[in-house]
Amino acid sequence: AQSVTQLDSQVPVFEEAPVELRCNYSSSVSVYLFWYVQYPNQGLQLLLKYLSGSTLVKSINGFEAEFNKSQTSFHLRKPSVHISDTAEYFCAVSYMFSGGYNKLIFGAGTRLAVHP
Amino acid sequence: NAGVMQNPRHLVRRRGQEARLRCSPMKGHSHVYWYRQLPEEGLKFMVYLQKENIIDESGMPKERFSAEFPKEGPSILRIQQVVRGDSAAYFCASSPSPAGGQETQYFGPGTRLLVL
C-alpha cells in the first residue's frame, strides 16, 4: 500500500535561514508527487508538483523540491525563508487506479514556524 | 474564476444530530473528492464522485456517512447521528478530469465540524 512519511512534525527556523522539509513515500508503481501548503484556517494550496522530466521542480515563491527515485524522496527546500512562509506543509502522492482516476495520499504534515 | 467553495465554514452539532456539508467545485470541474483531516493528522481520502456517480467510496465509513454529487447543485457530504469522533476538518477538492493521476486537485477552504 502507498504511504507518505513526513519525518518532521514541526520545524522552527529563523527568518532568512534555509529550510528543508523531508518527505519519503513508498510505492511500487509510478507516482506523481505534490507539495501543498495550508495557511491557518484555510484550505490547501498547491505549491509545486513533479509529474515527469526534470527531477528538480520550483515554485514561484522560492521553494523547490527534488524527486529522488532511488531514495523515494521528495524533499522541499527554500534557501531563505520569510515570516510569511509560516504554515503547514503537506507532501502528497498521486497514483492512478485502474479506473483511470487518481487519489492523493497525504503525509501527516510539517508545521513550519519562522521566527524573527 | 471562483475557486472551490465550501459551506458552512464552521459547523457545530450535538451528538446524534445530522451534519450536511456542501461543496461547489470550480467552474468546469466535474470531479469532486472529499477528504477528512483529523486533529494533528494529514488528510485522508473519503470519496470520489463525478456528476451523479460515486466512483470510489473506499475511504468512507460504512455507516452514517453518505455523499452525492447531483446533476444540478453542489456535492453534499452527509453525516447522520454524529459522534464526537466525527469532529474534524472536511475538505473538498475538484479537478476537470482525472488525467491519469497528473491532474491537480484544487481544494476548498474546508468545513470544520465540532460535535459537542
Image (cartoon, grey):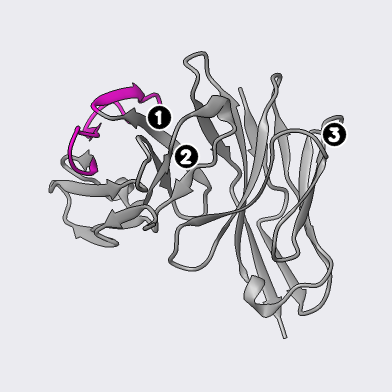
- Residue pointed to by mark 2: B44
User: In this view of the protein, which residue sits in the foreground, A53 or B83?
Assistant: A53
User: In this view of the protein, which residue sits in the foreground, A79 or B4?
Assistant: B4
Q: Residue at x 28, y 63 (%)?
A: B10
Q: Secondary structure beneath disc 1?
A: loop
Q: Measuring from the top left, give residue B3's x and y in whole percent.
A: 39, 56
- Residue B110, quarter of the rendered image: bottom left
Q: Residue at x 39, y 57 (%)?
A: B1
Q: Residue at x 49, y 24 (%)?
A: A101
Question: Residues at badges 2 and 1 in contact (C-beta under 8 Å)?
Answer: yes
Report whether A7 appears left or right of B116: right
Please state which amino acid type lies under the numbered disc 2: Lys
Q: Measuring from the top left, give residue A46's x and y in whole percent.
A: 58, 52
Q: CA distance from mark 2 to mark 1?
A: 8 Å
**Can residue B85 be found in the magenta stretch?**
no
Q: Measuring from the top left, give residue B57's x and y in whole percent.
A: 35, 25
Q: Chain of mark 1?
A: B
Q: Measuring from the top left, give residue A100's x and y in whole percent.
A: 50, 19
In the image, which residues are magenta?
B52-75
- Residue A104, quarter of the rendered image: top right
Q: Which mark is residue A71?
A: 3
Q: Chain of mark 2?
A: B
Please state which amino acid type lies under the numbered disc 3: Gln
- Tell me if mark 1 has few (under 14), some (14-19) or many (20+) residues whose alpha carbon lies within 10 angstroms of its own: some
- Tell me if mark 2 has few (under 14), some (14-19) or many (20+) residues whose alpha carbon lies within 10 angstroms of its own: many
Using the rendered image, report if marks 1 and 3 lie on a common chain.
Answer: no
Counting residues from the N terminus, which is met first, the one under dot 2 or under dot 1?
Answer: 2
Residue found farthest to the top: A98
Q: Which mark is residue B59?
A: 1
Residue found farthest to the right: A70
